[in-house]
């Protein structure tokens, strides 16, 4: 160690070097502060453990001593040197010297950087007035924030408006909608706009300029955060199993019949997984099995003599509550028949032909009504809205979250959140949980009132920039975009959104993007310093 | 000491802060031992690694470069490592053009939990580079020749059309182009390779001219190519405003560099 300190002192620009047992102890930190003051140091290099744990500590020490914290460089000679080359002391020491030499070379080129703050406009835009959007809106209003709730249809309620009763309680869907709508109405903080669609969204976290079209009218307002709760659609099985909307219908259409009391059928055959879990749509919507169970039970409840067959591939009823629910359905006398995707059922001549996998026999089932359980699919407007918000959708057109486990209701773009079926097929309780989650996430920037912007961001050299737009294409955070300026098309970094990865800069055709704190010059200086002495 | 034992490769690693650098830290905490040939530069994301800095490293006669990022799909910045993958693929092509073995550049993914895997990767790569020998051993080139070629390769990777193409690969191959067409991977790779090779020859010609005024024949001698090929490139370089005719000597026009 004393050898390393002596070596460091021999390097250009180094005026003070000292070895320490515990640099991160109070004594060690005080020593750094004193050294800065006494030697009028303008760069500090610490060679010890890892920046991943201790960089913040040394940065704040520099700051305490009046030095900009970004003028600090960390050299890792523990985790990546002494601890991994324990049998090769001599070569490890040479490596430590090289690492220090590289660190000093970079430190010389470090520039002071400042954090800045961006104000958050205290209003949330919630897109979608279904149960999910209403829940988010109420939750945000309860926290005292202003909310604009946008609904495309002429009334709130969304998908629930076309449902009859809900599993597992069999309560009426309309009652749930009524309760939520009353809550919305009671909140003066919520402004509801029905028959309205988002036309345009510009800006970034805290400062979104939103244009909403309401018939002929255009409304303009500002929002700090945005929640996407646009729900989903259900596949219309046109051309499948002779679907005709009369004797061969979807579960949603059956709900309507049950609701209006127009169901007049004694023998009902339900077919599961229609247009799902196949090559085109590989996913399971997970609500259709339970919906079929519920509707089958409601039919049996109203008419115990009715015959109900459910043709399934796998009954998906996860959760203790729903396994019991499935058990109850079996007890009511509903017949469950397992079919395989290789031998699909067929609807022909007034009956359904199905090969029962468990019996190993083909059955012919006459029917009054065939009900097709079709998957939840992404709303057809989703991709259009995704483009306006500059957020991604997955291969099935559902909105894609920032991280499946760590950030399930966030988008990668700061200030935009997703919940409910817009994100993925979800049941009502999941949608509501997610709605609370999204409201909670959205309320963080709203309550803090401002966001700190990292100084480690990309900066565009306007003189070099040709405005080609490759950076805009590359940035996963939509933090850089092309703008028309007096000097033509130029890339502009949105400081509040930039995460400082550097992907734009390393690919820029004109090399017109400077990545602060990891500049080309700083990286090259390390390479040059390393190459000075060979192994 | 035999020659084999006396050669210790110098290896530089660019490690992303979130996964591979953390994996290297874990190797340390777990005391997984590996050869001390590697020196590490920390970047926030592997996508920060500009192809030209890899060439700068080889120009300065280091023997191997590792670029390590998060596993695909796990990038802290979502898609950074996909760009790393494409850019480093192109970088390997440029190394090949220069005459170096692309094996000297390792691109791999290490998670924050893979300390042991990190140590193994370093061990294996160090051994691989040790076998390859000192930089350029795989070629018949003299050090100065290799250097010039590496500089040409670096300039190739700095060229607008190359960088533009690399940057669009994901979009062109995975999504579709403005005409709604998708390009097949093989087709794209072929196009990329051709672009690199073409650009490399252009940069070599420009570098060989330097401050001089030369005939096509003289240039051909310097870059060890046919006069026909050089002439074809001179015409295109002239069109791009990079060389111009500076007089005629005998029957041969003479050229010099202009502009960038």
Image (cartoon, coloured by chain):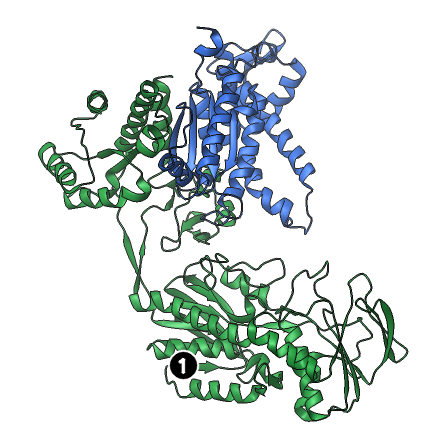
Chain colours: A green, B blue
Q: Quadrant of residue A302?
A: bottom right
Q: Residue at x 18, y 31 (%)?
A: A20
Q: As rendered, which of A305 and B61 lies closer to the eye? A: A305
- Asked if B257 appears above or below A256 in the picture, the reply is above
Measuring from the top left, give residue A405's x and y in whole percent: 48, 58
In the rendered image, is residue A129 in sight? no
- Asked if A289 appears above or below A17 in the picture, the reply is below
Q: Is residue A219 left or right of residue A252?
A: left
Measuring from the top left, give residue A59's x and y in whole percent: 23, 43
Measuring from the top left, give residue A297's x and y in whole percent: 68, 85
Q: Is residue A493 left or right of residue A106?
A: right
Residue lying at the far right of the rendered structure:
A349
Pointer 1: residues within 10 angstroms few (<14), some, or many (20+)?
Answer: many
In the rendered image, is residue B203 in sight? yes
Q: As rendered, which of A96 and A354 lies closer to the eye? A: A354
Q: Is residue A272 left or right of residue A72?
A: right
Q: Quadrant of residue A79?
A: top left
Q: Could you tell me how many numbered marks the image carries? A: 1
Q: Chain for mark 1?
A: A
Q: As rendered, which of A41 and A490 lies closer to the eye? A: A41
Measuring from the top left, give residue A518's x and y in whole percent: 36, 38
Q: Residue at x 39, y 39 (%)?
A: B26
Image quadrant where one finds the N terminus of chain B: top left
- Mark 1: which secondary structure? strand
Residue bearing the label numbered 1 = A190
């Amino acid at each position: 160690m004393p050898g390393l300190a002596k070596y460091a002192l021999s390097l250009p620009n180094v005026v003070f070097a000292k070895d320490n047992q515990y640099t991160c102890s109070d004594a060690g930190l005080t020593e750094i502060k004193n050294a800065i003051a006494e030697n009028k140091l303008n760069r500090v290099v610490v060679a010890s453990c890892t920046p991943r744990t201790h960089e913040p500590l040394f940065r704040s020490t520099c700051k305490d001593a009046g030095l900009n914290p970004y003028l600090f460089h960390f050299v890792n000679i523990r985790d990546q040197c002494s601890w991994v080359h324990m049998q090769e002391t001599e070569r490890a020491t040479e490596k430590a010297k090289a690492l220090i030499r590289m660190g000093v070379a970079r430190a010389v080129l470090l520039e002071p950087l400042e954090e800045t703050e961006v104000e958050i406009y205290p209003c949330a835009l919630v897109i979608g007035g279904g149960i999910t959007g209403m829940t988010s809106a109420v939750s945000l209003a309860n926290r005292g924030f202003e909310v604009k709730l946008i609904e495309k249809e002429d009334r709130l309620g969304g998908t629930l408006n076309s449902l009859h009763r809900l599993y597992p309680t069999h309560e009426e869907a309309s009652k749930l909608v009524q309760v939520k709508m009353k809550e919305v109405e009671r909140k003066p903080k919520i402004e509801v706009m029905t028959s309205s669609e988002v036309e345009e969204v510009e800006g970034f976290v805290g400062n979104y300029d939103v244009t909403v079209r309401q018939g002929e009218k255009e409304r303009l307002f500002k929002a700090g955060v945005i929640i996407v709760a646009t729900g989903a659609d259900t596949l219309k099985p046109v051309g499948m199993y002779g679907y005709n909307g009369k004797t061969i219908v979807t579960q949603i259409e059956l709900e309507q019949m049950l609701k209006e009391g127009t169901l007049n059928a004694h023998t009902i055959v339900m077919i599961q997984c229609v247009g799902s879990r196949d090559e085109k749509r590989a996913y399971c919507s997970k609500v259709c099995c339970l919906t079929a169970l519920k509707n089958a039970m409601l039919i049996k409840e109203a008419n115990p003599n009715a015959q109900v067959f459910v043709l399934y591939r796998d009954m998906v009823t996860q959760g203790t509550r729903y396994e019991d629910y499935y058990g109850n359905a079996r007890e009511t006398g509903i017949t469950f028949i397992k079919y395989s995707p290789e031998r699909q059922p067929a609807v022909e001549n007034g009956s359904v032909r199905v090969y029962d996998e468990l019996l190993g026999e083909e059955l012919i089932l006459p029917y009054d009504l065939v009900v097709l359980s079709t998957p939840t699919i992404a709303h057809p407007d989703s991709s259009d809205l995704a483009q306006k918000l500059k957020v991604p959708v997955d291969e099935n057109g559902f909105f894609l979250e920032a991280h499946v486990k760590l950030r399930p209701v966030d988008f990668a773009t700061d200030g935009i959140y997703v919940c409910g079926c817009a994100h993925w097929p979800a049941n009502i309780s999941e949608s509501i949980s997610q709605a609370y989650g999204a409201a909670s996430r959205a309320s963080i920037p709203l309550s803090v009132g401002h966001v700190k912007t990292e100084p480690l961001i990309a900066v565009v050299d306007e003189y070099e920039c040709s405005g080609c737009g490759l950076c805009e294409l590359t940035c996963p955070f939509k933090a850089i975009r092309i703008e028309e300026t007096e000097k033509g098309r130029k890339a502009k970094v949105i400081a509040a959104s930039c995460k400082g990865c550097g992907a734009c800069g390393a690919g820029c055709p004109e090399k017109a993007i400077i990545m602060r704190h990891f500049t080309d010059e700083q990286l090259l200086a390390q390479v040059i310093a390393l190459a000075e002495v060979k192994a | 000491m035999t020659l084999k034992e006396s050669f210790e490769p110098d290896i530089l690693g660019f490690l992303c802060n979130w996964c591979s650098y953390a994996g290297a830290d874990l190797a340390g905490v777990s005391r997984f031992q590996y050869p001390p040939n590697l020196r590490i530069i920390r970047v926030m994301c592997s996508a920060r690694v500009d192809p030209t800095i890899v060439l700068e490293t080889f120009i300065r006669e280091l023997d191997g470069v590792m670029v390590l990022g998060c596993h695909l799909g796990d990038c802290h910045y979502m898609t950074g490592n996909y760009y790393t993958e494409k850019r480093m693929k192109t970088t390997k092509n440029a190394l090949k053009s220069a005459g170096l073995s692309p094996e000297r550049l390792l691109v791999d993914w290490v998670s924050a939990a893979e300390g042991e895997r990190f140590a193994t990767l370093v061990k294996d790569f160090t051994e691989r580079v040790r076998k390859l020998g000192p930089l350029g051993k795989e070629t018949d080139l003299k050090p100065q020749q290799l250097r010039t070629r590496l500089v040409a390769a670096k300039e190739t990777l700095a060229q607008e059309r190359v960088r533009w193409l690399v940057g669009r690969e994901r979009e062109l191959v995975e999504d579709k182009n403005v005409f709604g067409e998708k390009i097949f991977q093989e087709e794209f790779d072929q196009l990329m390779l051709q672009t690199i090779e073409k650009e490399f020859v252009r940069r070599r010609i420009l570098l060989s001219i330097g401050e001089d005024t030369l005939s096509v024949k003289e240039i051909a001698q310097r870059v060890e190519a046919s006069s026909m090929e050089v002439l074809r490139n001179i015409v295109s370089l002239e069109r791009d405003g990079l060389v111009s005719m500076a007089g005629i000597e005998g029957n041969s026009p003479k050229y010099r560099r202009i502009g960038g």
